[in-house]
Structure formats: structure tokens, C-alpha cells
Image (cartoon, grey):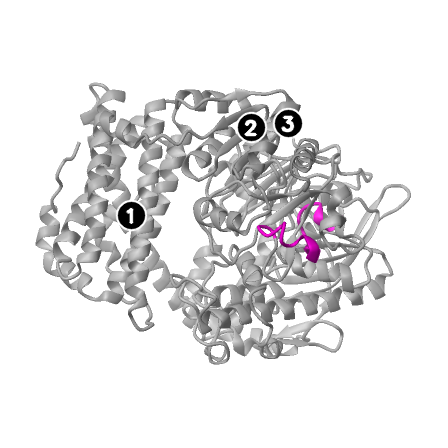
């Protein structure tokens, strides 16, 4: 174990952006608190994986992994709160969370639908992506040694997580581990595409509904408001029950 | 008749099966999917119910959904129209949210279960609440009061239920308050302002309220206006929830009560800001209680009935329930174990059975244990695979050993038989501890439940001994059956019940009857023999952000990840081995 992880090429190219994102203490604090939530969610997914697997060794490793995630959540939470304590109250600003696919944890993973092999491959890739991103954060946090120390601590565990998932994948998918990893990479890309497509569809849907809202609704809105003004306040007679076959 | 009830899509999905007029099983989807407050269509819960009953979907006589989707959609669309043009932001979200599976429920049920459309029925939301409250209570005539955030249009309804000599059931809704005027939404708005998640953090507001003074109750009463016919209306200028999907409160609200709490900011009751939050919580709690007491008193006077059945999410407010019992004139108040939306699955099925199909009244077993069983053998296997010792005991030895461990200050995970239906752990999926020391409360909050320090823990006590330790009004034992009432701890016992006595000297007592939970009752008696005090701290068997455990594997997982010292499932007991395992794990990586 103890694989050393450095930032990915993409992250190195985006270094000025990362530096800018982490320079603002307010944003930094909120990102850390967001990471705390993500890590805690990831910990819950890993606990679920431990509950579902029939492999005793994997169960112990998943439990250990889950404990690590919860510890990371506590570290991030504590540091985020410490930063916030020293700052004036402000609304959350731009956090650039979309920059951090590796930090999405296991949120789009249905643990109960995965077999050990595919789960280990997914975990390995997720941990690697997170470790690369955290390595970049560590580098741009030279001005904040306390936060940097949190990432140091987390990175140590990430190395273990990457290592055990790789070793165990080789054990449970003997001879198929490379194929599993490629399938997991493709699945991650597919999920990224689905997220992007869903986001785009949502934007288009919102736009169309807004157009309809302003074009079609005004006359109906007029009637609805007029009817509302006639409604009595407080108790009204209960609606006469409709038959159970009716949806209305 | 075999009738499946379903609640879904907003929060707390569930399924329940009624056969021959009696519940067979019921479970919340979250207990099976392991996603807290899972609102998805409860496919796992339905599959489990059918499997438990040994039925195929085509053998069902009816599938009943707990609300009328088209009527609900009408409300959402109407609110968008009324708020025009201020609803321009929320409209697309509301439509996208509703036009998916929430509107096409009939098709979804038909496609998942393969049942013909004619077998699919729909109750109204508050009908299902009323049925869940009345038809599960051991009474044949009662006034009914249901209150929650919102169903289709109704947010609160009053009525009555009766079973005649021939066993025919009638549930009559007399009056209702309609959206956007809602006690549930009022409380949820304050929940959101206090930085807690809505539909989940309302308990926290009630717990926090005990730390404050209702010094802002007059301000809250400006928000909640009483109307001449005995109802209420909200002054909507204080709210945004009817116009916006993003915020519940308006700037006027913020001007009056101050800036909302940042959810990341812990509540520190030693600071002025922390005390202000507690005072606001106490104020909204006071106004809610006063309003409910008034409504219940009027209902008592109108119906003349001695029994009241309470339903809807608001009925989870144990402080309000206790005041209703003490002050409204009702002799008995019944709150079902699942008064929220999950319970509507059972309510809808029972309503269809008794009212739609007019089947004769049947007494419903008066317990909450309708969920899946845990297998002790699974626990033995899991512990063995992890190198932990597991011991199998005969009943008396097991109870004596657990009582000894509790007396020694150990924390016990207790799993017994079928799980509870509803949000409370009532002795089948519980974390138990000695109630004597306030340090135990802090330990549980810190190392097991990982939750705020201001939240209290509940005591469980045999029903025969309850009045000795707790100041229960007449009917209080009944309200304590499903932990639905908050009552004072007798002053002379508060020091010895420090871990379960809240800051205001009260506790949400569970009165355990031997007939309902014989093993838990026996454990309490064993504890009484060992310590002289047959009371235990009883909190739900889960960690923060997770649903209550269901099967042995989940109990074991929670045991592994928390400071629980001892896990008991049926006759099997597993003590925790504290030896560090990290080195061994890293060696295999």
C-alpha cells in the first residue's frame, strides 16, 4: 500500500482556477462542509456494501473504509466550521462543485445492485479520482496549513483505499480485473453523460415551461385569483368524498 | 379481501397489506432500501409484503393509493396560478416534479404489479390519515383530528368515526382547513428557519423548544390568526412556501425573527443567538399546542365523544398530544404508531376494506410490529466471520446478563422479532442504556447517535410502574404505548433518571405492556430486579442519517460502526471486542 497520488493532468492545467476557488475562506469553508456531507454519504454506502457482501474479508475492509469516510467527514466538518467561525455571516457563493467529479463520492451508485467485482472497480476509480483532486487541493492550499493538513490526512487513507480495492479486485475477479476496471470507467463516463444530458434537458424543459407560463397562464391566473378572494378563511365544509375509483 | 395500501412520492413511502380486514404486514421503503425517508415508489416494501403473505399481485382484490393524484395536481397548478407572476421561478420545477410519476400513479401501479386498473383505488390523503388513526385504535366511536403539512388541499380535518352494532364503519370528515393555511407548514417553516431539514428536523425543534422561553409567542400569533368559526388562517405575507420552491419564509418573517440559522452553524445555547433560536422554537411550539388544544376542545364539545384519534405528521408532536389529553376534555387520545404519511398505506387499505367494500369491523391488533423479522442465526454467522464471540442463552439467563451489562453502564443494541412500523423504536429495534446518569445521554449523543446535544432520549417503563416515576394524567399510559406523549418526570426521580429527563423535567415515556412486547417487558423487569429501577433509556437503533435497522446484518453493521458495547438478537448475544484491527486490514491491502 501507500501508492503516492499526484494531481491529474487536467487538474494541473486547471491549477489557477483551483487556486482561485480555494483562496476565498468563505467558499473554502463551505466546500469543506460539502465534502463532509459527501464523505458521510459515501460512508453510509460502504456500510451498506459491508452489510450486503458475503465475503468476510471484503466486509471488514468495507467497514474500515466506512469508518475512514466518517472520520474524514468529521475532519472536513470541523475544519469547515472552524473557518466559518472566524468569518462574517454570508450567503453561500459560487463553489465550483461541478469541478469535482471525484468528490461526488458514491452518490449515484446503487450499492444493492452491484456485485463485489463491479463495486470494487467503481470504488477504485472513485478513490483514485478523489485522491488526484485532493492532491491538487493540497498543493494550492499553501496559504492555509490547517486545511492542507486535513487533506494530508485524508490522502493517506485514500492511498489505502485505492490499494485495497485494487488488490481485492484482483482477488475476487481473478483474470478479469482489467476488464472490470474498463467497464467501470465506461460506466462512469456513461453516468457523466446522463448527468449532463439530464441537466441540459432540465434547462430546456424549464425554458419551455417558463414560456408557457407567461404566454398561457395569465387569463387563468386572473380567474384563479378572483376565485381565491371569495374563499372564506379558516374552516370550510369538508369536500364530499368522491368514490375511491376516482383520482380526483 | 386482500388489500394492498401504498403511500409514496413525497416522503416516507410505505406499503401495508390487509387480509380479511386485519393487517398482515407493513413496512416503510426506507427500512428495505436503506435510504432515510425514501420517497420512491415502494417496490421493495410491496414485494416484501406480498412475499410475507405468500401472495401474487393478481391475488390482490384491490391496491389503494393514499391520495388522489389529480386533486393534488389541481392544487399545485392552482397555487401557481394564484401566485402569478411571482411563481414564475417555482412553476417549472413544480410542473416537472408533478408531471412525472406523481401524476400517473395508476399506470405505475398497474405496470409494476400487473393488476387491472379497476382494482386500483385512491383515498384522499386525510381520509387515509383518519382511517390510520381510527381503525387501528381500540375504540368504536371517536372524534378524529388529522393535521399535517398538506395532502391534496386539506391540511387539517376534523370529523368522527363510528362502528355501528352491525359492524358497519363510518368515517365522516366534518370540516377542514385548506392549503396554504397549515399548522404543519407553519411548524416546518420554523424548522427550515432554524436550519433543520424539513420533514425530518421537526423533532429537533420540539427538543430545542424545551431550552427556550416562549417569549416570541405573541409574534408567532401574528402569523397564525384565529378565525371566528374556530379555525385559523396564516397571514401569508410571512411566508413564501406557497410561491417559491426555494424558501419557506418571506423577508417579513426574517425582519421579525432575525436571520435564519446557517445549517452548518451549531446551536450553542450558551450564546445569545443560540438562546434566541431556542426561544423561537419554544414560541412556535406554544402556539401550535394552544391551537391544537383549542381545536380539540371544540371538537370534544361538538361530538360529546370521550375518545379522540389523532393522525397526520403533527400527531408526532408528543408535547402537543400530552396537552390535548390534559386540557381538551377527551378521556382517551389515540395516536397510531405511524401517524405520518407512512401510516397512510395502512390507513388507505383499512379505509377501502371498511368503507369502500363495507366489510364488517374487525379489531386490529394493538401493536406496531408489522415489519420484517431479524434472524439471530445471521448475527451468529456475521460475528463468527469477523472473529467476534457470539453466545446463545436461554431467556432468563439472557435477560439477567443484559440487565447486568446495562447496570455496568454498557450500551446495548436490542433486536427482537418483527420491526416496528413507524418512526419510533418501541423495543424491537432499540438501543438501550441505563437511564441514571446524564453522562450516558452525552455519550449516546456523541458516540452513537452523532446528534445535537439538546435532543433528549426517551425512557421505557413497564406500564404497571409508569405512574411511580412519571406524572401521567388519566389516559397517559395509553398515549405512552407508542411513545406519543411527553409527560413530567416526578421530581423525586429526576436525579436517578437524569439521562432521560429533558431540561424542562419531562420525558417522552414509552409505557410497555407485557401483552404488546413481552420480551422487552421482561427485560425491563429484569433491570428492575437488578437496579431497583425498571426504566431504560430507549432510542431508535440507527445512526445519524440512516433508517432504523431492519435485519441482523444492519444491526451488526451499526454495532460495528458505533460505540454500542453489546448486540442482542433473539437469544444471541455478541459483545464488542475492542482490539484494533486496522493493522490487519492494511496488511491485506
Q: Nearer the viewer, residue B317 or B227?
A: B317
* Residue drawn at (51%, 64%) of the image: B191
Residue B211, percent from left and from top: 56, 65
Q: Which residue is mark 2?
A: B569
Q: Which residue is mark 3?
A: B53
For label 2, count other residues whose C-alpha is less than 10 Å away and answer few (under 14), some (14-19) or many (20+): many
Q: Nearer the viewer, residue B322 or B92?
A: B322
Highlighted range, magenta: B478-500
* Residue drawn at (35%, 37%) of the image: A46
Chain to which the residue tagged by mark 1 belongs: A
Distance from label 2 to label 3 (Cα)? 24 Å
Quarter placement of the C terminus of chain B: top left
Same chain shared by disc 3 and disc 1:
no
Q: Which residue is mark 1?
A: A104
Residue B506, percent from left and from top: 65, 57
The tag earlier along the polypeptide, 2 or 3, is 3
Q: Secondary structure at mark 2?
A: strand
Contact flag, marks 2 and 3 (Cβ < 8 Å): no
Q: Nearer the viewer, residue A240 or A77?
A: A77
**Residue lying farthest to the right in this orientation:** B165
Evaluate whether residue B425 shows in this view: yes
- The image quarter containing residue B151 is bottom right
Q: Is residue B226 left or right of residue B271?
A: right
Amino acid at each position: 500500500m501507500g501508492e503516492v497520488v499526484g494531481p491529474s493532468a487536467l487538474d494541473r492545467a486547471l491549477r489557477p482556477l483551483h487556486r482561485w476557488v480555494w483562496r476565498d475562506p468563505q467558499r473554502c469553508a463551505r466546500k469543506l462542509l460539502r465534502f463532509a456531507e459527501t464523505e458521510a454519504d459515501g460512508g453510509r454506502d460502504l456500510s451498506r456494501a459491508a452489510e450486503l457482501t458475503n465475503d468476510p474479508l471484503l466486509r471488514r475492509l468495507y467497514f474500515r473504509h466506512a469508518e475512514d469516510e466518517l472520520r474524514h467527514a468529521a475532519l472536513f466538518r470541523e475544519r469547515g466550521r472552524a473557518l466559518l467561525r472566524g468569518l462574517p455571516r454570508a450567503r453561500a457563493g459560487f463553489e465550483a462543485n461541478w469541478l469535482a467529479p471525484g468528490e461526488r463520492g458514491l452518490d449515484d451508485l446503487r450499492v444493492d445492485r452491484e456485485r463485489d467485482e463491479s463495486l470494487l472497480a467503481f470504488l477504485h476509480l472513485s478513490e483514485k479520482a478523489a485522491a488526484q483532486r485532493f492532491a491538487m487541493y493540497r498543493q494550492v492550499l499553501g496559504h492555509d496549513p490547517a486545511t492542507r493538513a486535513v487533506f494530508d490526512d485524508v490522502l493517506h487513507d485514500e492511498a489505502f483505499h485505492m490499494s485495497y480495492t485494487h488488490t481485492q479486485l484482483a482477488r475476487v475477479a481473478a483474470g478479469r480485473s482489467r476488464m472490470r476496471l474498463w467497464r467501470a470507467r465506461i460506466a462512469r463516463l456513461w453516468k457523466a453523460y446522463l448527468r449532463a444530458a439530464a441537466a441540459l434537458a432540465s434547462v430546456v424543459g424549464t425554458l419551455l415551461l417558463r414560456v408557457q407560463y407567461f404566454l398561457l397562464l395569465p387569463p387563468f391566473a386572473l380567474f384563479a385569483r378572483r376565485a381565491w378572494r371569495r374563499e372564506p378563511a379558516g374552516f370550510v365544509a369538508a369536500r364530499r368524498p368522491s368514490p375511491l375509483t376516482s383520482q380526483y | 379481501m386482500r388489500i394492498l395500501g401504498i403511500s409514496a412520492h413525497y416522503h416516507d413511502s410505505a406499503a401495508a397489506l390487509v387480509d380479511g380486514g386485519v393487517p398482515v404486514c407493513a413496512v416503510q421503503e426506507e427500512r428495505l432500501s436503506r435510504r432515510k425517508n425514501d420517497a420512491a415508489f415502494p417496490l421493495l416494501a410491496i414485494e416484501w409484503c406480498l412475499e410475507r403473505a405468500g401472495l401474487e399481485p393478481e391475488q390482490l382484490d384491490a391496491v389503494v393509493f393514499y391520495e388522489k393524484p389529480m386533486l393534488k395536481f389541481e392544487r399545485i397548478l392552482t397555487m401557481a396560478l394564484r401566485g402569478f407572476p411571482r411563481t414564475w421561478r417555482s412553476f417549472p420545477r413544480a410542473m416537472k416534479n408533478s408531471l412525472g410519476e406523481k401524476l400517473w400513479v395508476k399506470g405505475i401501479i398497474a405496470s409494476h404489479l400487473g393488476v387491472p386498473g379497476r382494482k386500483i383505488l385512491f383515498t384522499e390523503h386525510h381520509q387515509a390519515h383518519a382511517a390510520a388513526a381510527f381503525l387501528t385504535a381500540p375504540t368504536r366511536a371517536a372524534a378524529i383530528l388529522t393535521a399535517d403539512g398538506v395532502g391534496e388541499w386539506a391540511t387539517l380535518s376534523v370529523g368522527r368515526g363510528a362502528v355501528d352494532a352491525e359492524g358497519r364503519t363510518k368515517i365522516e370528515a366534518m370540516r377542514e382547513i385548506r392549503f396554504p393555511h397549515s399548522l404543519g407548514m407553519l411548524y416546518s417553516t420554523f424548522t427550515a428557519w432554524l436550519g433543520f431539514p424539513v420533514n425530518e428536523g421537526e423533532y429537533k425543534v420540539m427538543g430545542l423548544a424545551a431550552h427556550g422561553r416562549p417569549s416570541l409567542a405573541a409574534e408567532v400569533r401574528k402569523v397564525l390568526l384565529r378565525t371566528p368559526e374556530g379555525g385559523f388562517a396564516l397571514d401569508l405575507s410571512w411566508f413564501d412556501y406557497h410561491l417559491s420552491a426555494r424558501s419557506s419564509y418571506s423577508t417579513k418573517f426574517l425582519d421579525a425573527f432575525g436571520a435564519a440559522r446557517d445549517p452548518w452553524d451549531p446551536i450553542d445555547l450558551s450564546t445569545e443567538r443560540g438562546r434566541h433560536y431556542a426561544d423561537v422554537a419554544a414560541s412556535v411550539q406554544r402556539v401550535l399546542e394552544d391551537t391544537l388544544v383549542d381545536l380539540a376542545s371544540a371538537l370534544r364539545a361538538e361530538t360529546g365523544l370521550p375518545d379522540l384519534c389523532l393522525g397526520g405528521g403533527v400527531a408526532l408532536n408528543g408535547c402537543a398530544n400530552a396537552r390535548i389529553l390534559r386540557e381538551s376534555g377527551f378521556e382517551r387520545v389515540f395516536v397510531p404508531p405511524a401517524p405520518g404519511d407512512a401510516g397512510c398505506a395502512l390507513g388507505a387499505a383499512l379505509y377501502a376494506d371498511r368503507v369502500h367494500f363495507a366489510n364488517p369491523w374487525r379489531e386490529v391488533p394493538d401493536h406496531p410490529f408489522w415489519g420484517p423479522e431479524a434472524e439471530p442465526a445471521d448475527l451468529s454467522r456475521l460475528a463468527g466471520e469477523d472473529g467476534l464471540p457470539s453466545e446463545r442463552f436461554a431467556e432468563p439467563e439472557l435477560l439477567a446478563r443484559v440487565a447486568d451489562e446495562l447496570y455496568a453502564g454498557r450500551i446495548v443494541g436490542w433486536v427482537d422479532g418483527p420491526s416496528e412500523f413507524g418512526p419510533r423504536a418501541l423495543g424491537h429495534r432499540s438501543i438501550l442504556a441505563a437511564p441514571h446518569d446524564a453522562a450516558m445521554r452525552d455519550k449516546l449523543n456523541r458516540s452513537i447517535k452523532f446528534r445535537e446535544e439538546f435532543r433528549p432520549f426517551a425512557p421505557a417503563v413497564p406500564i404497571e410502574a409508569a405512574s411511580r416515576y412519571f406524572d401521567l394524567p388519566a389516559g397517559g399510559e395509553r398515549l405512552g404505548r407508542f411513545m406519543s406523549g411527553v409527560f413530567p418526570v416526578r421530581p423525586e426521580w429526576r436525579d436517578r433518571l437524569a439521562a432521560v429527563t429533558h431540561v424542562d423535567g419531562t420525558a417522552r415515556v414509552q409505557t410497555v405492556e407485557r401483552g404488546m412486547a413481552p420480551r422487552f417487558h421482561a427485560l425491563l423487569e429484569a433491570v428492575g430486579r437488578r437496579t431497583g429501577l425498571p426504566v431504560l433509556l430507549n432510542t431508535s437503533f440507527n445512526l445519524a442519517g440512516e433508517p432504523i435497522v431492519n435485519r441482523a446484518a444492519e444491526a451488526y453493521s451499526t454495532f460495528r460502526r458505533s460505540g454500542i458495547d453489546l448486540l442482542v438478537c433473539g437469544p444471541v448475544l455478541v459483545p464488542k471486542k475492542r482490539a484494533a484491527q486496522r493493522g490487519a486490514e492494511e496488511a491485506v491491502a
